[in-house]
């Protein structure tokens, strides 16, 4: 090994370890906007930095004058007050100069905005619907046409985020930024993203894409993105949407076009299998297993993991008259909702509803312990 | 004139005991009640902020449930805006405007009494919701539907509390306008009015224009909930975004309702302690009026991400950027007032300089958020929490505190404890920056606002922020200490109080007589404030 190569190796090692150390420090104290992975996010980042530099320069100038004055024009230094109180020239100057600076900012800002609003010519369309407190993704066209699923906070994060859960959040990687079903999108594709909501207003934000947009019931907002690098990008709901607003993250897997095709085929066959499942008889164990995960993704945020609800807000399922009452009434309530209880008929399929009802009727201190089949739910629709 | 004042004082039939306060029609007593009420609400709202910062001290939920956390952020904002800052501004206006324009009292003393006494009832309604089925409001102080309609039994109480607060503010505003337009001393022309009076006239017009809009919006919420209307319900042909447009048509002028009195106060303080006349009096008046006018055309910058046509986004971006021009003029004028002055740094001046630096900082982040494409990243993150707290706390609360220190010797007749005042300023200034500055960083790095728990990369900054928060909360105890000490005694204050003080209020004795000017003073160019 030549000396040069050794030098290179040592230098590389030092550089990497410095980078790791500084990386670790910066991870503890994040400071700035992400540059992101889309043309939009890069333009936004550049604009952000440019304006930040401009206002910093203005700040240094203005605060500098103030500081100079505070330091030198003080009575204790024998300063005698001048009595001037007007200068038309000065006032015109400090009106015109800010106007020029603002115009200088407005030009690139306008260009970026026009660029961001060009939603036409997309290769595929994803519809994002906000629910209290999860996201629904519908693939409207292309290879993924017909794929539709909900994406909620992962079970482990949910358990750790319970009050005094005893689980240290720092032991969970990407705490509160994990979901059960991530949304998968191809890279190098112009994707139109529609946002809307089913109940209250939410906002869909993945910082790496460079924008957020409200999801408003009754509105469909259109946006677009073009992801340039494969990777996992995480985001959050950013419009207050009720008690679990802080607990409905977004996880986006950007994959190559080939991987996306494979994923889309897989999803479609899974959905076919699920549809098949609705027509057969399920064993109690199968239903209980499925029901538990449906419960934690859809019910536990209000009715709580222990089924005891929150007094005055969300009724207990543990020992509840409805859960221990006739199956028909309970199926009807889940399908059609009541007051704050959402209607689940469009959110969950027959198997899911049968499973979660079976789970609830067999859990905690509930006494009925019977089984509800997908066919019973189908009959209730 | 002095004799006449003393003579009149003998004939005052002011009730004693509790009646003096309940039935008061005196601008000073009502002003005092407003200020004391504001201080109490400042501590109630502050206690809620302490709950928020305790919960956010580390990730995971330790103290409160998410729903209660949301109530804390919602009611903290309502209490601080409508209970602490606005009444403090009205309290200062009540105390000072008659004295500054050479009037004996406010134009409508009984209405003055009523506009104050509505406040305790309104806040009883609001705070009682904590004990109701469904809890206190938790949908944000902005009350966006459909979320706000999910509130339990507290919902109508929230709506009626807002109605009462609006009625109180409108009555206060009418009173101030009537007083300034009709009761100025001879020679006190509009362009001789002290800047504090000017900023308050403009604020009063903003209040009259904006508060009925808020009342209308919340009434529509009420009928949507109870009477089957669907103003904001998409399923019934309504529009949830309509509420946001109406709300922010009130909400943006409201921002200036909060900040203009603070601008007025520091325009009084800086010339006094620089011993130099205010620079550019006329341009200050015009800049304030332009800011107020423009404030009606920028509302949608609070909702850039809601989904608007490109033309709308561009219009609101340009209009928002335009507000930076008159605001800049004001900052430059204050700086020019200090320039080549002969400055001393008593507590009021320290707070005024604090406003100058830190309000400007909040203005910079405000300008950044006015740029629509980058606001798509900033919106609803801690970056905006940092921005509006910089504007509201070191921008507005510091202005009010400066005003309190500036006029406290005039009110009580005693000088306050300067050492304690300086402690209050420095403790507040250091802690407020530890509290709010790092919020810029975590906001940019992706932490949304209004969340009770957060991802672990934000842990360290949140701890620092919470420490700053507790420090700022504790620092305010200095204020209580200084005020109580000053009321109980201290060095006798002269009429002028401050070496460089100008203006009619400083021609009266300290404390001033019960009816400020029973014989109107004659104001000439030489004795006018500017």
Image: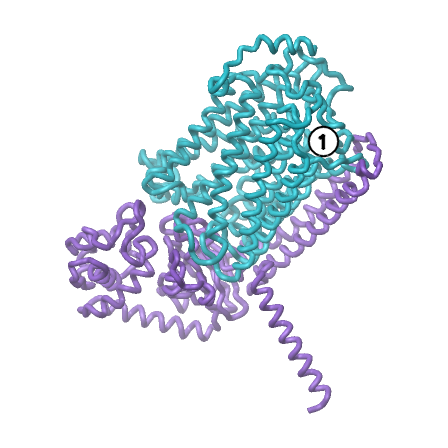
Chain colours: A purple, B cyan
Query: Which residue is drawn at the image coordinates 54% and 24% (left, top)?
Result: B173
Q: Residues within 10 Å of mark 1 (few under 14, many from 20)?
A: some
Residue B198 visible somewhere in the drawing: no
Tell me if B105 is positioned left or right of A164 in this view. right
Residue B289: x and y, percent?
64, 30
Query: Which residue is drawn at the image coordinates 76% and 41% (left, top)?
Result: A70
Residue A187: x and y, percent?
50, 69
User: Does dot 1 land on a helix, a strand or a loop?
Assistant: helix
Which residue lies under the disc numbered 1?
B283
Residue B209: x and y, percent?
53, 28
Residue B467 visible somewhere in the drawing: yes
Camera-side residue of A79 and A286: A79
- Position above or below: A22 against B318: below
Tell me if B218 is positioned left or right of B107 in this view. left
| The image quarter in which residue A35 lies | bottom right
Camera-side residue of A216 and B285: B285
Dividing the image into 4 quarters, which one contains the N terminus of chain A? bottom right
Residue A157: x and y, percent?
40, 63
Camera-side residue of A210 and A268: A210
Q: Chain of mark 1?
A: B
Query: Which residue is drawn at the image coordinates 62% and 31% (left, top)?
Result: B404
Tell me if A239 is positioned left or right of B336 in this view. left
Query: Which residue is drawn at the image coordinates 65% and 11% (left, top)?
Result: B5
- Position above or below: A272 against A224: below
Tell me if A64 is positioned left or right of B314 in this view. right
């Amino acid at each position: 090994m030549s000396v040069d190569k050794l030098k290179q190796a040592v230098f590389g090692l030092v550089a990497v370890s410095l980078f790791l150390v500084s990386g670790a420090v910066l991870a503890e104290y994040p400071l700035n906007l992400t540059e992101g992975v889309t043309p939009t996010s890069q333009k936004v980042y550049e604009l952000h930095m440019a304006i930040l530099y401009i206002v910093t320069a203005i700040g240094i100038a203005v605060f500098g004058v103030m500081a100079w004055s505070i330091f030198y024009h003080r009575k204790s230094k024998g300063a005698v007050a001048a009595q001037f109180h007007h200068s038309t020239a000065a006032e015109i100057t400090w009106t015109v100069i800010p106007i020029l600076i603002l115009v200088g900012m407005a030009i690139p800002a306008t260009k970026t905005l026009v660029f961001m609003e060009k939603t036409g010519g997309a290769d595929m369309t994803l519809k994002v619907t906000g629910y209290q407190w999860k996201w629904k993704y519908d693939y409207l066209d292309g290879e993924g046409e017909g794929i539709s699923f909900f994406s909620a906070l992962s079970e482990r994060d949910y358990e750790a985020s319970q009050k005094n859960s005893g689980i240290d959040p720092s032991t969970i990687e990407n705490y509160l930024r994990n979901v059960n079903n991530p949304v998968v999108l191809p890279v190098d594709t112009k994707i139109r993203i529609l946002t809307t909501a089913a109940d209250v207003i939410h906002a869909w934000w993945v910082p790496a894409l460079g924008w957020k947009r409200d999801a408003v019931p009754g509105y469909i907002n259109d946006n677009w993105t073009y992801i340039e690098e494969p990777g996992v990008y995480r985001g959050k709901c950013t419009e207050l949407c009720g008690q679990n607003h802080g607990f409905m993250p977004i996880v986006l897997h950007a994959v190559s076009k080939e991987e996306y095709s494979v994923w889309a085929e897989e999803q479609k066959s899974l959905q076919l299998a699920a549809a098949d499942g609705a027509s057969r008889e399920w064993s109690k164990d199968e239903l209980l297993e499925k029901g538990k995960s449906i419960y934690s993704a859809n019910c536990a945020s209000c009715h709580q993991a222990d089924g005891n609800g929150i007094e005055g807000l969300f009724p207990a399922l543990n020992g509840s008259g409805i859960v221990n009452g006739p199956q028909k009434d309970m199926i009807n309530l889940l399908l059609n909702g009541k007051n704050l209880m959402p209607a689940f008929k469009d959110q969950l399929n027959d198997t899911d509803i049968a499973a979660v009802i079976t789970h609830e009727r067999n859990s905690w201190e509930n006494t009925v312990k019977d089984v509800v089949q997908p066919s019973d739910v189908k009959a209730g629709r | 004139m002095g004799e006449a004042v003393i003579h009149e004082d003998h004939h005052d039939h002011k009730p004693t005991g509790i009646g003096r306060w309940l039935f008061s029609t005196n601008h000073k007593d009502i002003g005092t009640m407003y200020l004391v009420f504001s201080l109490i609400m400042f501590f109630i709202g502050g206690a809620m902020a302490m709950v928020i910062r305790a919960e956010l001290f580390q990730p995971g939920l330790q103290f409160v449930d998410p729903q209660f956390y949301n109530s804390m952020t919602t009611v903290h904002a309502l209490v601080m805006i409508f209970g602490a800052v606005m009444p403090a501004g009205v309290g200062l206006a009540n105390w000072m405007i008659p004295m500054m324009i050479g009037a004996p009292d406010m134009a409508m003393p009984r209405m003055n009494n009523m506009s104050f006494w509505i406040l305790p009832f309104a806040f009883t309604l609001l705070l009682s919701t904590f004990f109701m089925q469904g809890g206190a409001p938790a949908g944000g102080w902005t009350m966006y539907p459909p979320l706000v309609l999910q509130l339990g039994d507290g919902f109508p109480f929230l709506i009626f509390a807002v109605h009462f607060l609006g009625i109180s503010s409108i009555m206060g505003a009418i009173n101030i306008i009537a007083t300034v337009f009709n009761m100025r001393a001879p020679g006190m022309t509009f362009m001789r009015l002290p800047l504090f009076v000017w900023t308050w006239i403009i604020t009063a017009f903003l209040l009259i224009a904006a508060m009925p809009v808020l009342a209308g919006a919340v009434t529509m919420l009420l009928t949507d909930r109870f009477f089957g209307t669907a103003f904001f319900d998409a399923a019934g042909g309504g529009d949830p975004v309509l509420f946001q447009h109406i709300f922010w048509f009130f909400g943006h002028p409201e921002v200036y309702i909060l900040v203009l009195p603070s601008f007025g106060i520091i325009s009084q303080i800086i010339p006094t302690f620089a011993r130099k006349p205010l620079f550019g009096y006329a341009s200050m008046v015009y800049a304030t009026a332009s800011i107020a006018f423009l404030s009606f055309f920028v509302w949608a910058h609070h909702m850039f991400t809601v989904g608007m046509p490109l033309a709308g986004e561009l219009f609101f971006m340009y209009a928002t950027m335009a507000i930076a021009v008159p605001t800049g003029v004001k900052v430059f004028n204050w700086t020019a007032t200090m320039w080549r002055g002969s400055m001393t740094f008593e507590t009021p001046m320290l707070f005024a300089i604090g406003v100058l630096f830190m309000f400007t900082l909040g203005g910079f982040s405000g300008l950044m958020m006015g740029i629509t494409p980058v606001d798509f990243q900033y919106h609803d993150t801690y970056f905006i929490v940092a921005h509006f707290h910089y504007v509201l706390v070191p921008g507005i609360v510091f202005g009010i505190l400066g005003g309190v220190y500036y006029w406290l010797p005039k009110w009580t007749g005693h000088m306050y404890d300067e050492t304690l005042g300086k402690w209050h300023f420095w403790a507040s200034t250091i802690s407020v920056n530890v509290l709010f500055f790092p919020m810029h960083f975590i906001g940019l790095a992706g932490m949304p606002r209004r969340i009770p728990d957060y991802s672990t990369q934000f842990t360290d900054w949140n701890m620092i922020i919470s420490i700053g928060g507790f420090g700022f909360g504790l620092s305010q105890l200095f204020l209580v200490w200084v005020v109580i000490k000053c009321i109980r005694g201290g060095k006798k204050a002269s009429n002028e109080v401050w070496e460089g003080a100008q203006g009619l209020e400083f021609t009266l004795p300290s404390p001033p007589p019960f009816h400020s000017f029973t014989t109107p003073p004659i104001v000439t160019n030489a004795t006018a404030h500017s």
